[in-house]
Image (cartoon, rainbow, N blue to C red):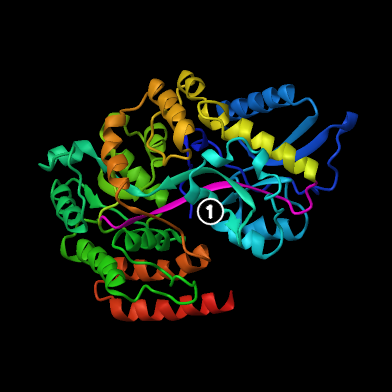
Amino acid sequence: MRNTGIRRTLVALGVGALALTACGADDEAAGGKTRITVNCMPPKSAKVDRQFFEEDIAAFEKKNPDIDVVPHDAFPCQDPKTFDAKLAGGQMEDVFYTYFTDARHVVDIDQAADLTPYVKELKSYDTIQQQLRDIYTVDGKVYGIPRTGYSMGLIYNRELFEKAGLDPDRPPTTWDEVRDAAKKIAALGDGTVGYADYSAQNQGGWHFTAELYSQGGDVVSADGKKATIDTPEGHAVLQTLHDMRWKDESMGSKQLLVINDVQQMMGAGKLGMYLAAPDNIPILVKEKGAEYENIALAPMPGGEGTLIGGDGYMFDKNASPEQIRAGLKWLDHMFLTPGDGFLGDYARAKKNDAPVGLPEPRLFTGAADTKDQQVKKANANVPVENYQAFLDGNQQLEMKIEPPHAQQLYSVLDGVVSAVLTKEDADIDRLLKDASGKIDGILARS
């Protein structure tokens, strides 16, 4: 699953249903240049981001006059409904955007180029976090390059915390503390909700997974063959949601919520807490009416783990060696140079009033990370102290990627979460047992 953006430049962008023109067949542009098609260009509606993207491509082509970059735009960066069809039909760009959860699938259906012989030419590769590199490594071979990452945390309203007699500098660290804080916030009345959660459009299943990780549980077994939700941890997640909804009445009466509903509530100052990643913060401010000073982020309650996600680029299996080398150079220039490029030019972002200083998980290590953090700190324009608890707490949490066949599993788990939040007499034991059987069936067919 994916949040509404990953890093500050992605708030307004996202690309997807791209022009269905055959890609990878012609790697020579006029004049003997190597031509590469790439996707995830910001749409025209995201004027500033599109301008940055075009500027960066122009700078790259000036620096590499033997390469012609042809960008494709659409919204969002990847449409799950058309992704497999484009791959199978030979319509994918030479260098194409993927979620972390796509990597193994694209390799399994033999649609990805093996980058192993070329990856040493990617200057930044060894500076990228190992756990992120591993996501695109299958059976010892490299098939993709990570670009951004996110981890889930607890977004909360500092003003409501203060009104409810809670210390906004000491956010909840356990689910019991979340429940207690939610009751106090809901007691403020006037339609105020203490804690909100998603329960539709696969988003309920996504959040169930995050909440399960936070308590040390998992959705599937380590070998990926069996469901592991009918466990004490799975029961604890649902029991907490049930009790907050029905006993405490701290989750409000309106349910079957999705991300936009919850963001609207938070932006309007009517919600105390919800689970999200840092990319939600600028959306709350720029689109929903919140203020940066009032929005804070804490680590996932529970103290065991947090769900991570992100994106990267893979290469069409028919890309030529020249296209692969050109594409790797392009990735280095656009996304993987600390303090520079589309995602790293924090000075340019600040000048154009884009948020700088949000607590994204660190992509780089060593000297590259040091430089990236220095440049970010020098250009920060958001209250970074509001996110310190998140940064500190994440150091103690296990970072866990989404389960295999995530969207199919989330669809099953949506029904479990929605039942608990809409039916006071929901049978948690039966719900988890039935969902386990459905998940086992999905895994068996894979």
Quadrant in the picture for residue 43: top right
Residue type marked 1: Asp
Quadrant of the rendered image containing residue 285 = top left
Residue 334 in the image: above or below residue 139 = above
In the image, residue 24 above or below residue 440: above
Local secondary structure at mark 1: helix
Q: Does the magenta stretch include residue 80?
A: no
Query: Which quadrant is home to the C terminus?
Result: bottom right
Q: Is residue 286 visible?
A: yes
Q: Residue at x 61, y 62 (%)?
A: 139
Of all residues, the one furthest to the top in this rendering is 351
97 sits left or right of 133 in the view: right
Residue that numbered label 1 is attached to: 134
Residue that appears at 17% across and 41% down: 170
Looking at the rendering, the stretch of residues picked out in magenta corresponds to: 303-320
Image side of residue 183 versus residue 334, left or right: left
The residue that appears at 65% across and 60% down in the rendered structure is: 107
Percent across and percent down for residue 376 are 42, 26
Residue 97 rendering spot, x and y as whole percentages: 62, 47
